Image: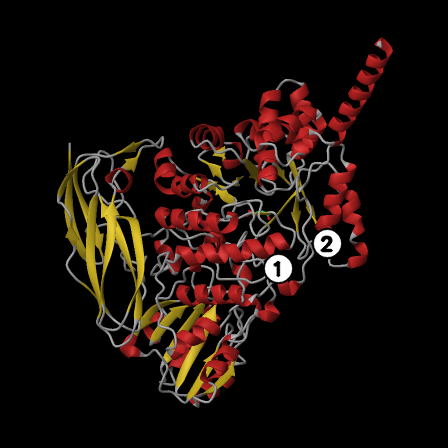
Amino acid sequence: MKKVTLLLSVITITLFSGYKKENPLYKDAKQPIEKRIEDLLARMTLEEKVMQLNQYTLGRNDNANNMADPVNDIPAQIGSLIYFGSNADLRNRVQKKAMEQSRLGIPIIFGYDVIHGFRTIYPISLAQACAWNPKLVEQACGVAAQEARMSGVDWTFSPMIDVARDGRWGRVAEGYGEDPYTNAVFTVASVKGYQGTDLSSEKNVAACLKHYIGYGASEAGRDYVYSEISRQTLWDTYMLPYEQGVKAGAATLMSSFNDISGTPGSANHYTLTEVLKDRWKHDGFVVSDWGSIEQLRPQGVAANKKEAALKAFTAGVEMDMMNRCYDNHLGELVKEGKVSEALLNESVRRVLRVKFRLGLFDRPYTPTTTEKQRFYRPESMKIAEQLAEESIVLLKNQNKALPLNKVSKIAVIGPIAQTKWHLLGSWAAQGNAEEVTTVVDALKAEYKDKAEVTYALGCDFDGQDKKNFEEAKNVAANADVIVLCLGEKKNWSGENASRSTIALPQIQEELAVELKKLGKPVILVLSSGRPLELNRLEPISDAILTMWHPGTPGGKPLAGVLSGRVNPSGKLSMTFPYSTGQIPIYYNYRQSARPHQGKYQDIPSTPLYEFAHGLSYTTFQYGELKVSATQIKRGSKLLVEIPVSNTGDRDGVETVHWFIQDPVSSISRPIKELKHFEKQLLKKGETKTYKFEIDPERDLSFVDGNGKRFLEAGDYNILVKNKKIKVEIVD
Ligand code: BGC
């Protein structure tokens, strides 16, 4: 009997341990994520933990014969890879290696810069904000997420939400402009679009808020340099989009390159740990920017890579993107007791948590699909086109020069007119220029039998060659109107693309001057990744509109606006200065000691086109501003309303921007601050009421230099267009 019992126990133990070995708890999809994390963590060695915290790259290799090489080079235990593939084949092969050749079979998370689309490219973020349509941005990010996830990407390094006020900085193209609230609204929209409600769905990717934080303040618009940001400004200007993005559930953040008043973004314990983790309770992870850990050396806060690893890791950067600092030094730092095991475990937990939430442990491979199933689906193109249409801003329209509906010959001239590649904009992911419609082709299709469209290059983007001026003048002389398409190349904005002036190269301005001499109406069409200096072009243009870098739809949305099929409704998300010398210039500046003095002697002190400027083919009249009460106690809410009428001769869309002003406060406040916007379609002759429900604690309060919110008793102004109403908060 004893022998039988012993035998049974041996069998049971063997079976049980065998079972445990093949089906560890962390592999059981039915278990709660936190339990799975703890189970897995308990099994991991120091080396395995460290490897989870590194990101290398994979791909960049179009040659099918060579594809095996990078796979062989990738360690099976690597935590993450930046994936440059446009289909999932290579990913799946590397993932198989991770699942089958690493001891614990931990899946790799594949990240990529899906910034304004994956293959179907929609307008750059700066343009998207000009559409003032967060729902549409959410849908566009949803398209990007689906195309990316189906192509093997689990995680996008987007949205970029760096408030930016210096157009010389190339990266203004990647963010939502100069205003904290606008950036915050579009942060939430894009996070929702990318992540949906279920990260594990094959349509969604994890988002990454970047670049945390203050990168937009890079001195004089130079990239990678110092940024001087007081704690007050940090909270007033830069934190809000991140705070809202974290609240919206963004899975990850990226630490920034910039030195924030002496402590770089990638070694900043205050922002990364005290605020992000301790206060905001973010439970995902932070990845460094590319090289931003090893760059702590040239920034002068670390003597070598090991010290850089120590500083970044203990500040709160969990994953090392392409620095080779963590894989080489973190284990050693733990063994030496300089990094605690508790911190190491906590960091690994965070990375694993995102992987579990993405469902990577349960479905590590991306199902194979055809390009047709993934890319350019009609509904995706529709969203991209609508967003491009709505982001076009009509800056000037003298004597109703636009729309062009009574012309029989249109001359389209300039370096933007025939380009496909440059319309995609910076960070165009897997965008394919061949799919882009040029301005000339779009106008030919738009006007088909109605008008003749002719084309001449005129000049290149830059240089001094005027040999094509003559041909352009001849083409223009034969037309009723000149559509002059000027602007910037794709790579004139984006990373490491600073410019000393935001004016267009002289050759383009000279071409405009020459064409103006013909006495025909000049419609200036701009395509750029930043606001431009237009003070010399403005007087010689009858109408001006910007289509920014519109992405795959290319010239088609523009053609709709020029012909009048589409009534423009975009409004600027970033100020167009009168000239570069005004920079930094933005609407929400703080009041001066002498508001009527201190002006420039040589140029105007006001911008050429201010924030929220944008015209329509119809006219809107703003009625009487009404408020539900002029005096309220803390804790109650207010309703402000304004009727807006479409007084023109066609339907139109109007976005109303609501600003607040705190004229006297314990610290000086910006001259005005955007707190709400609303966009509505108004039919010809129709009047609609726009509303803003003011929650004083949220909308009238301000933060101190540590993020603490205050609502002070006293007067506040609510501003809409040129109307103002006063309300009082009483104790
Ligand atoms: C950029 C990031 C980007 C990363 C990965 C860096 O150089 O600053 O915005 O996400 O590279 O490509």
What residue is at 74 percent from the left and 40 percent from the top?
98
Q: Where residue 715 sits: x, y (%)?
A: 15, 41
Q: Where residue 468 sits: x, y (%)?
A: 53, 81
Q: Is mark 2 within 8 Å of ligand 1?
A: no
Mark identifier at residue 407: none
**Residue identified by numbered label 1:** 430
Taking 216 as reference, is 259 above or below it?
Answer: above
Taking 676 as reference, is 440 above or below it?
Answer: below
- Quadrant of image for the C terminus: top left
- Quadrant of image for the N terminus: top right
Q: Nearer the viewer, mark 2 or mark 1?
A: 2
Residue type, numbered disc 1:
Gln
What residue is at 41 percent from the left and 81 percent from the top?
482
Q: From this viewpoint, which residue is outermost toward the left?
A: 630
**Residue identified by numbered label 2:** 89
Q: Is residue 501 visible?
A: no
Residue 522, picture quadrant = bottom left
Taking 456 as reference, is 350 above or below it?
Answer: above
Q: Residues within 10 Å of mark 1 (few under 14, many from 20)?
A: some
Residue 688, picture quadrant = bottom left
Total numbered labels? 2
Dot 2 falls on a residue whose secondary structure is helix
What residue is at 74 percent from the left and 46 percent from the top?
94
Dot 1 falls on a residue whose secondary structure is loop
Q: In this image, 563 relative to 720: left or right?
A: right
Residue type, numbered disc 2:
Asp
Of 643 and 614, the residue lying toward us = 643
Q: From this viewpoint, which residue is outermost toward the front?
A: 1
Taking 518 as reference, is 111 above or below it?
Answer: above
Residue 729, picture quadrant = top left
Earlier sequence position, callout 2 versus callout 1: 2
Q: Is residue 669 visible?
A: yes
